[in-house]
Image (spheres, grey):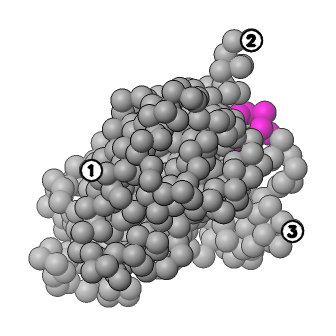
């Protein structure tokens, strides 16, 4: 008899969570993860060692829980995973994360046989399962987390990952950069819930505007690419593909037991599907941030505001190399800018390098507004030169007002983005003075502006966003 399985949407209707295998290892990791954010979820703890953790009673057995459960986090030794899954399913759970590892990723006959048994059991119970060998689910709106001490940042970015570590890193880096997430799914060995089904779920998920994915290798590669192609017609999906090299492919096999496949074939397929690809976690987060936090760019024409003529030359070459355009500032805007500028070392033709005038918050903020209104520029990149401002403010005894300088810049940049419906990207170069840099960074994040560790990140991300929208528009008109 065929067992009816809940859909992903049905599985995510969660009011109660049981953590099975509560342990002092890693400092009660899963308990801290699930209790760090305010929420209305009932959280039940189960371990052979009874007691209490963070004000929550630990039950000795799943059957001792005095209510049904909707979802289970299973972190027990491999030898008891199967009976635990059967027990939580009998208790009403619609879904489970199996954190336990030691299956096909080992590459051993024993590991493969245990995964076969795992699959056989899961196919016969009315429950969906992430894993084994994964972090499972993070759903910020519900208060459901898979890592402790992280910012709760809700938003419109969905994410799927073969690797739990990559999922945690992407969420952590994204949240620090102001990127909010709808749901994150870490699927590990994907015995039950597989990437194509997750991509299919995001196609119609109203909470999700853009999707990121970390993929090593999947059995159903053609199905995954088909679903991504469908998704890309509606929403952007950005992929970081692991196992691009021979050595990386070998590492993939030992990580999740997957086969990475030919990099050339994957790259061609992603291009055909209009799926932007990246090669680092930092580039992934940067690209997602532009898609999530910025209006759609109307063209590749960008304006730049910086402090140095030398770096402006470098940034112009960088933009052109990435396929962006750096048009000249119009005569009308030049006439508006000219009365504001006093220093002889400036250039207003684009990039706008302000030299010493950059240090005046009123001047630079007004320049941002005027340049943002420039009809020749459909996107704006502002370089927040923390190190220069910090150095001058320190010798002038004005360090206490630097935050006000950055607030003025952030307000002007946000105003431009909203009023003119243009992407305004902020690069905060990671050069020196980490505390001062963090203060500036957080101010721009607070204003919901996409922020980047350097100009290259901003330029590359914007270029990929332009690529995606151009291809989508061109194909929609065919």
Q: Which residue is drawn at 77% across and 63% down?
A: 243
Q: Which of 150 and 31 is in front in this view?
A: 150
Q: In this view, does 336 lie to the left or right of 327?
A: left
Gap between marks 1 and 3 measured at Cα: 40 Å
CB contact under 8 Å: marks 2 and 3: no
Asked whether 272 falls inside the magenta stretch, the response is: yes
Helix, strand or loop at disc 3? helix
Q: In this view, does 115 lie above or below 57?
A: above
Q: Which of 142 and 274 is in front in this view?
A: 274
Range covered by the magenta-colored residues: 269-277
Q: In this view, does 388 lie above or below 90?
A: below
Instruction: Tell me residue 441's x, y (percent).
Output: 39, 63
* Residue at mark 2: 478
Helix, strand or loop at disc 2? loop
* Residue at mark 3: 246
Residue 142, disc = 1
């Amino acid at each position: 008899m065929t067992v009816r399985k809940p859909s992903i949407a049905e599985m995510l209707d969660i009011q109660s969570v049981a953590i099975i295998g509560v342990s002092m290892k890693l400092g009660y990791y899963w308990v801290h993860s699930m209790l760090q954010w305010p929420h209305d979820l009932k959280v039940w703890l189960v371990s052979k060692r009874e007691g209490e953790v963070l004000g929550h009673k630990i039950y000795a057995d799943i059957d001792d829980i005095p209510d049904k459960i909707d979802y289970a986090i299973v972190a027990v030794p491999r030898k008891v995973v199967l009976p635990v899954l059967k027990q939580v399913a009998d208790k009403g759970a619609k879904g489970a994360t199996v954190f336990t590892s030691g299956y096909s990723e080992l590459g051993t006959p024993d590991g493969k046989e245990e995964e076969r048994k795992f699959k056989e059991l899961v196919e016969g119970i009315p429950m969906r399962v992430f894993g084994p060998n994964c972090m499972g689910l993070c759903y910020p709106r519900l208060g459901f987390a898979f890592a402790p001490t992280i910012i709760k940042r809700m938003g419109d970015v969905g994410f799927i990952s073969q690797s739990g570590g990559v999922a945690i890193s992407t969420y952590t880096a994204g949240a620090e950069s102001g990127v909010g997430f709808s749901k994150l799914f870490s699927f590990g060995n994907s015995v039950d819930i597989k990437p194509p089904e997750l991509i299919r779920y995001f196609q119609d998920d109203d909470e999700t505007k853009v999707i990121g994915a970390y993929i090593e290798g999947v059995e159903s590669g053609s199905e995954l690419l088909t679903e991504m192609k469908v998704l890309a017609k509606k929403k952007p999906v950005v992929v970081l593909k692991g196992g691009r090299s021979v050595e990386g492919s070998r590492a993939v096999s030992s990580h999740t037991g997957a086969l990475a496949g030919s990099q050339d074939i994957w790259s061609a397929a992603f291009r055909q599907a209009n799926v932007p690809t990246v090669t680092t976690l930092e580039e992934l987060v940067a690209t997602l941030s532009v898609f999530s936090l910025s209006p759609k760019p109307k063209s590749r024409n960008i304006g730049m505001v910086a402090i140095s003529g030398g770096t402006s030359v470098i940034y112009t070459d960088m933009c052109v190399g990435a396929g962006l355009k750096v048009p000249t500032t119009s005569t009308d805007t030049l006439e508006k800018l000219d009365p504001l500028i006093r220093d002889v070392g400036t250039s207003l033709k684009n990039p706008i390098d302000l030299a010493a005038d950059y240090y005046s918050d009123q001047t630079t903020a007004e320049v941002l507004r005027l340049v943002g209104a420039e009809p020749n520029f459909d996107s704006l990149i502002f370089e927040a030169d923390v190190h220069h401002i910090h150095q001058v403010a320190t010798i002038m005894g004005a360090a206490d007002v630097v935050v006000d300088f950055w607030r003025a810049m952030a307000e002007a940049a946000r105003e431009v983005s909203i009023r003119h419906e243009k992407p305004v990207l902020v690069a905060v170069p990671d050069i020196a003075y980490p505390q001062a840099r963090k203060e500036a960074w957080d101010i721009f994040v607070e204003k919901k502006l996409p922020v980047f560790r350097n100009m290259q990140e901003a330029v590359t991300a914007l270029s990929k966003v332009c690529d995606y929208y151009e291809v989508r528009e061109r194909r929609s008109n065919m």
